Image: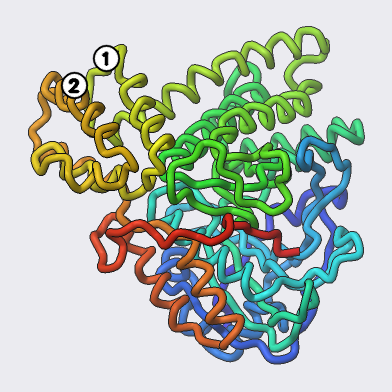
């Protein structure tokens, strides 16, 4: 095979404690399901070489291309609040990194490529369903403008994996600004390896926060950068009704990208208590809890960084707490800013804006109103009347009452109605990865080897702000609550 990827392996040049060297396990009959050609081209990769049988072999781990230096990353993490001192990539191999035309560095990782030293008795493989889910949802998030890992390719392996039943196997090629997680810092902190921790912070600063290297306290400046990125990310999740489902510290990337799409889902009816993950039995990662969990995770990162913030522990704690003290205001402002834009408000803010937006959410919750449709139809309501929105509410008068105060606020805002409508349509998507559509696409592929619904849904999700046939009505009422499952 020609050289479709020019690898540059900076993480693999770090000390051995950071990873385990391991090659992906070859598979029997790799077949390319989908290559993300636009992403490949944006990264400067040879899409023609990748879109071939030899490319499928590389993208499945059946062969390792020249220049790759395959490793499984080490990290720890709090899983549902319980600390595990060693986790690591149990079913993923980082082949290496690429640098695009703008000088940005990205990881190229195979997910589902076989066991590693961190597999903990797992088979290291991935089933087709979770691979298709991550492809669809991560690419949908990218189209929505939300920072995320990307899906470069999905490949069938020609082998089965055993979960509750035998399922077809697959490998996802994932692209990320990096795979460094909060849990990576916890890994070194838990071992008291201050040299390793310092090396990790220096590497992360150079890769993600070069300006922090010039700050008086680089580790603290780095932490503040991570915090700002997490705030922006979670506020964007909340804006579109996304529920990550498993915000463990090993699933939170310091780059500010959404990572790991196992038990994720999207709200249909607005419900702050929504939990979709089958393993989140106590609602730790419910929709409305996500900002608070982000703060909890950042506290864990701050704890890990204490030795580098100051040599005196008491002084380090004081500085870390001072940095963390701004989180509620940052998160609140980012969340409210998103809500203000969703209901069509420009600058300047008024004191009652947050309460006005929250009152709409409360009425949506009480009346079972669909999250996506309510805000999308609201784009037309200023000039088109209440009818299209109010019918989404069990008690339409609940919306009518709110709309009176909303229009009064819009009148004070002074924005041209046509400009407001256009701005709202750029903020409120018409198309999201509806849970029933994702499941239907997966079922067709896994149960019937029919990838047509997957391709069609992927195409729809690539244009989330365009009106599309079949997206203008609420989804069918489910007989049972929707549940998602980890792919392991």
Residue 350 marker: 1
Q: Position of residue 209 (x, y in %)?
A: 56, 35
Residue 61, position in %: x, y?
A: 71, 78
Find residue 71 and name its label.
none
Identify the element where label 2 is drawn: helix
456 with respect to 381 (left or right): right
In-front residue for pair 352/253: 352
**In this rendering, is residue 312 above or below 242?**
above
Q: Judging from the image, what secondary structure is the residue with disc 1 in?
A: loop
Task: Compute the Cα span from label 2 to label 1.
Answer: 9 Å
The part of the image, by quadrant, that contains residue 447 is: bottom right
Quadrant (top left/top right/bottom left/bottom right) for the N terminus:
bottom right
Kindly identify the residue that appears in the image at 78 percent across and 62 percent down. 71
Circle 2/circle 1 CB separation < 8 Å: yes
In this rendered view, identify the residue nearer to me: 316 or 273: 273
Check residue 409 in the rendering and tell me which mark sits there, or answer none.
Answer: 2
Which quarter of the figure is the C terminus placed in?
A: bottom right
Residue 320 position by quadrant: top right
At x 30%, y 46%, the residue is 392
What's the residue at 69%, 74% (across, down)?
Answer: 127
**x, y (%) of residue 266?**
49, 51
Compared with 164, 30 (above or below) is below
Q: Nearer the viewer, mark 2 or mark 1?
A: 2
């Amino acid at each position: 095979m020609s050289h479709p990827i020019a690898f540059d392996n900076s993480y693999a040049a770090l000390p051995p404690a950071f990873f385990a060297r391991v090659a992906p396990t070859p598979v029997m009959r790799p077949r390319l399901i989908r290559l993300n050609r636009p992403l490949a081209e944006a990264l400067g990769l040879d899409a023609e070489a990748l879109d071939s049988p030899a490319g499928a072999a590389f993208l499945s781990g059946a062969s390792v291309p020249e220049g790759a230096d395959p490793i499984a990353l080490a990290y720890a993490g709090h899983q549902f609040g319980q600390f595990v001192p060693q986790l690591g990539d149990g079913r993923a191999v980082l082949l290496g990194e690429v640098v695009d035309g703008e000088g940005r560095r990205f990881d190229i990782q195979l997910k589902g490529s076989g066991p590693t030293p961190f597999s903990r008795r797992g088979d290291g493989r991935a089933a087709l369903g979770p691979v298709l889910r991550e492809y669809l949802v991560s690419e949908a998030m990218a189209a929505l403008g939300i920072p995320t890992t990307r899906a470069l390719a999905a490949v069938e392996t020609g082998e089965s994996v055993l979960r509750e039943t035998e399922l077809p196997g697959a490998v996802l090629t994932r692209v990320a600004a990096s795979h460094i997680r909060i849990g990576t810092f916890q890994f070194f902190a838990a071992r008291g390896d201050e040299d390793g921790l310092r090396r990790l912070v220096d590497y992360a600063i150079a890769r993600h926060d070069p300006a922090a290297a010039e700050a008086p306290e680089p580790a603290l400046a780095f932490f503040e950068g991570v915090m700002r990125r997490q705030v922006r990310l979670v506020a964007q999740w909340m804006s579109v009704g996304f529920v990550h489902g498993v915000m463990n510290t090993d699933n939170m990337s310091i780059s500010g990208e959404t990572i790991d799409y196992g038990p994720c889902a999207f709200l249909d009816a607005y419900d702050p208590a929504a939990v979709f993950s089958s393993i989140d039995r106590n609602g730790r990662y419910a929709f409305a809890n996500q900002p608070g969990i982000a703060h909890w995770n950042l506290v864990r990162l701050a704890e890990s960084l204490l030795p580098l913030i100051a040599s005196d522990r008491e002084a380090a704690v004081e500085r870390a707490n001072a940095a963390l003290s701004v989180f509620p205001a940052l998160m609140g402002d980012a969340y409210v800013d998103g809500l203000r834009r969703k209901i069509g408000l420009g600058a300047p803010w008024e004191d009652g804006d947050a309460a006005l937006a929250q009152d709409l959410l409360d009425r949506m919750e009480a009346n079972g109103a669909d999250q996506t449709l309510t805000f999308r139809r609201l784009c037309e309501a200023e000039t088109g009347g209440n009818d299209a929105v109010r019918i989404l509410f069990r008690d339409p008068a609940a919306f009518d009452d709110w709309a009176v105060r909303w229009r009064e606020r819009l009148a004070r805002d002074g924005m041209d109605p046509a400009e407001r409508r256009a701005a709202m349509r750029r903020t409120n998507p018409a198309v999201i990865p509806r849970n029933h559509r994702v499941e239907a696409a997966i079922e067709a592929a896994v149960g019937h080897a029919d990838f047509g619904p997957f391709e069609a849904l992927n195409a729809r999700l690539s244009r989330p702000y365009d009106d599309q046939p079949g997206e203008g009505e609420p989804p069918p009422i489910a007989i049972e609550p929707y549940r998602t499952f980890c792919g392991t």
